[in-house]
Each structure stands twice: as structure tokens, then as C-alpha cells.
Image: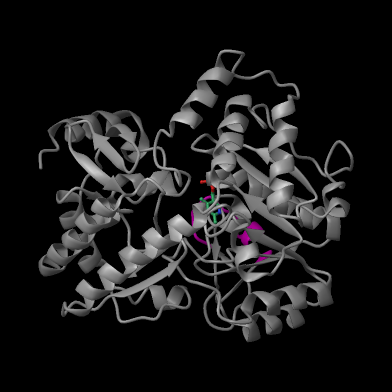
Amino acid sequence: MNHNKSEQLFTAAKAIIPGGVNSPVRAFKSAGCNPIFIDKAAGSKIYDVDGNAYIDYVGSWGPMILGHCHPKVVEAIQKTAASGASFGAPTALETELAEMVNDAYPNIEKVRMVSSGTEATMSAIRLARGYTGRDKILKFDGCYHGHADSLLVKAGSGAATFGVPTSPGVPADFAKHTLTATYNDLTEVKAMVAANKGEIACIILEAIAGNMGCVPPAPGFLQGLRDLCTAEDIILIIDEVMTGFRVAYGGAQEYYGVRGDLVCLGKIIGGGLPVGAFGGKSEIMESLSPEGGIYQAGTLSGNPLAMSAGITTLKLLQEEGFYQQIEEKSSYLEAGLQQVTAASPVATCWQRVGGMFCTYFQEGPVNNFADALNSDTDAFGRYFRSMLDQGINLAPAQFEAGFMSVAHSKEDLDKTIAAVEKALTAV
Ligand SMILES: *Cc1c(COP(=O)(O)O)cnc(C)c1O
């Protein structure tokens, strides 16, 4: 497969954009090769500038659950654009999408639109702190909630409970307010909450951890956090930026039957345009400016193009049997992959919830970030490069989820299974 034009474009990009990309994972660094530059996409396929076609399991990191360029979404964006791209003033579209969010997530009584998942989690945390009057927050190692300062924090070593920054530029003074616990370890969370009684504003988590591959919550973990938060007046923030409208129309909260006090959304809700949202109990949301005193704003928040792409996408997801189709395609892929991986000497572990999944290069199971780190990332790199060469576009890093779309055909899935069988011989 020829990548000459991609190589040229990458060289030009690196001269003017840090690392040649506007989001680090796109540089393919942990896959051990250079990125492909995209020309266009349609349905389940993505095409690079050298004219190579790939079956796409990245789906813009989750949003493209309908497949790329669904004609109705394209039409909605074009039609809205013809009336004006942005006004900085309210439109009816914002209320329409807000009402759809409330229908899907009954605990989101009020919602505010923003322009990214990062903005949603950052704002939800400010709101939780402002509402409770507490500074500390608790997150889980391996959960990603965007790149705001308080959230770029990992567990401190040994007995330390204070978090340490994962990036230069995050002041230790900020990181010290972030406690970091082990995913799926309720006992540890309870101990941390007891040691910081009355000081923790919120616990934030991915109800299915999709930024360390695909780690489902252990039985009782979510309910245990819910009960703990209720008992301690801690705000439970469920970050559904990835899982919302993905594993079910009502996200992980519908799937597992556990509800947060605040919820963050993004990705699918924008249908491929830049959108995020955060919402929850009216009583908490009413503390936001201009109703209350906690400040949050955005020039492009509730952007009409993004709202109409989101509304049209969600309407299509409401069609009878949509999530059943996603489940059937995903379980078909799962069955095929399990057959070829079982026949291979390479150690792999497949984990999936609905239309999100991960193949870890290790025996597994993976229940938390430390487990995930046991994966053979070099083996993953060889696997990834072989898959790319065979026309399959996977997330270019071991600790990322793959995403199914409704546009993936049985032929796509069969090709993928055959490619995995071949790729495993190259690992
Ligand atoms: C992608 C993601 C974010 C960040 O969203 P951006 O739009 O990239 O800022 C936050 N939380 C989770 C769970 C995500 O998957």
C-alpha cells in the first residue's frame, strides 16, 4: 500500500503544527508508523489521500455511529448553513436538542450545550465544586475526561492520596485537589472518601472505561458509587461523552440502571460536529450563570450547525431496532474474532460492551488501568500496521476503543475477521 502523499502532507504539517496533528493520538506514535491523511469517507469506509480505502472502526473516535456522511445528516447541515452558521443568540434548535437529551436521560432535567467533551467535564466539575462548596474531586486512574487541568492527574505513588500531574503545565497545586482511585475498586474509593470526609465535591467516572480500551464496570461498582455519593452528599458525575447514545440510546446509565447527579455528553450528540453537553438535576444546574452564580459560557455554544447535526443523528438512532443492529454486528465480529484469536498462539483478550470494544494483547481480563498496562504494546503495533496494510483502520493505540457503526456490512465484518487472522501471524 502506497502512502506517498500522506508522507508528504505529514512532513508539511510537522513544519507548522506541533507533531503535525491537532490531537496527539492522530500522530500514530504508539503504532510505530506515520499517520494517513484523510481525503473523504462514506458509510463504513474512509479513504486516504493516496486513494486507499479502509474499513473504519475509529469513526472519528465514536461520533459516527451512523457511518460517515449519512445523507440526512449532510442535508441537515447544508440546510442549516444556508440560514447562517452562527448568531451568538438563542435558536429553537437548542431547546429541541435539549428536550431530546432529557427524553433519553431522565436525570438530565436541565442541560447546557458546549463545544467539546473537555468543556463539558471541566464545566461539570466547576459546577460540582461551586454547588457543594468543596474543592476536592475524585477520579479513576485510566479514565479520560478531556484535557482540563484538574483532570490530567494520575494516582500518586505508594500511600500518597494526592494526585500528581500527568502533564507539565498542570500546577501541582491544582493536582493536589484531585484524588485518584483504582477503577472497579469500591473498597479503595470508600477508604478515600472516609479519609477526606466532607471535602469531596464530586466523583467523576466513565461508566464504561473506553479510554483504557474497553473496561466494563464490575457488578455492583456503579451502584456502590451511587450509594456512597448519596450518603456523603457527593455529586456523582457520569462522563458519557463516549458511551452516551453508544451502548444504548440512554447510554451506560440506561444499560446499567444507575444514574448520575450530573452527566457529560459529547461525540455522538454532535453527529460529527463539535458539541458537548452537561446536565443533571435542576437544583444543581440552576446554580449556573445567569440563573445562579457559577460562571460558564461559550461564543459558539449551541451552534446551529452542530445542533441540527445532533438532532438529525438522534432521530435516526430512535428508529426501531437500531441498537439491536449495532449489537448484532458487534457480536458477529466478536464471534469471528474469538474463533481466529483462539486458534492463534498470540495472547489476546477481547472486551466489548455494545458497539465499543478492544483487543488487548495479553491474557486478560482487564479490570483497571494497571491491568491494561500489562498489554504487549509492541505486538499491538505490529498488529495495527498489518491491519492498516490490509485496509482496516483501527484506533492507532492499544488503550483505545474500537467503534461499530450501523453502516458496517457483513462483508466488511468478514473481511475484518480474515484480516485479523492474517495480522496475528505477523505479530
Ligand atoms: C472523548 C472524551 C472526552 C473529551 O471530549 P473532547 O470532545 O475530545 O474534548 C471526555 N470524556 C470521555 C469519556 C471521552 O471519551
Q: Is residue 173 magenta?
A: yes
Q: Is residue 329 left or right of residue 131?
A: left
Q: Quadrant of residue 420?
A: bottom left
Q: Count numbered badges in the picture.
A: 0
Q: Quadrant of residue 49?
A: top left
Judge by depth and name the residue closer to the eye, 344 or 180: 344
Q: Position of residue 275 (x, y in %)?
A: 59, 38
Q: Position of residue 340 (x, y in %)?
A: 20, 72
The magenta region covers: 165-178
Residue 376 shows in the view:
no
Q: Which image quadrant: the N terminus?
A: top left
Q: Is residue 55 left or right of residue 183?
A: left
Q: Say if 305 sits above or below 285 in the image.
A: above
Judge by depth and name the residue closer to the eye, 64 or 72: 72
Which residue occupies the extreme front position in the image? 320
Q: Quadrant of residue 38?
A: top left
Q: Position of residue 263 (x, y in %)?
A: 69, 55
Q: Is residue 311 left or right of residue 12?
A: right
Residue 211 shows in the view:
yes
The residue that appears at 56% across and 58% down in the rendered structure is 248
Q: Which image quadrant: the C terminus?
A: bottom left
The residue that appears at 21% across and 39% down in the rendered structure is 53
Q: Position of residue 149 (x, y in %)?
A: 60, 52
Q: Say if 137 sits above or below 314 in the image.
A: below
Q: Is residue 224 magenta?
A: no
Q: Is residue 61 left or right of residue 299?
A: left
Judge by depth and name the residue closer to the eye, 82 or 207: 82
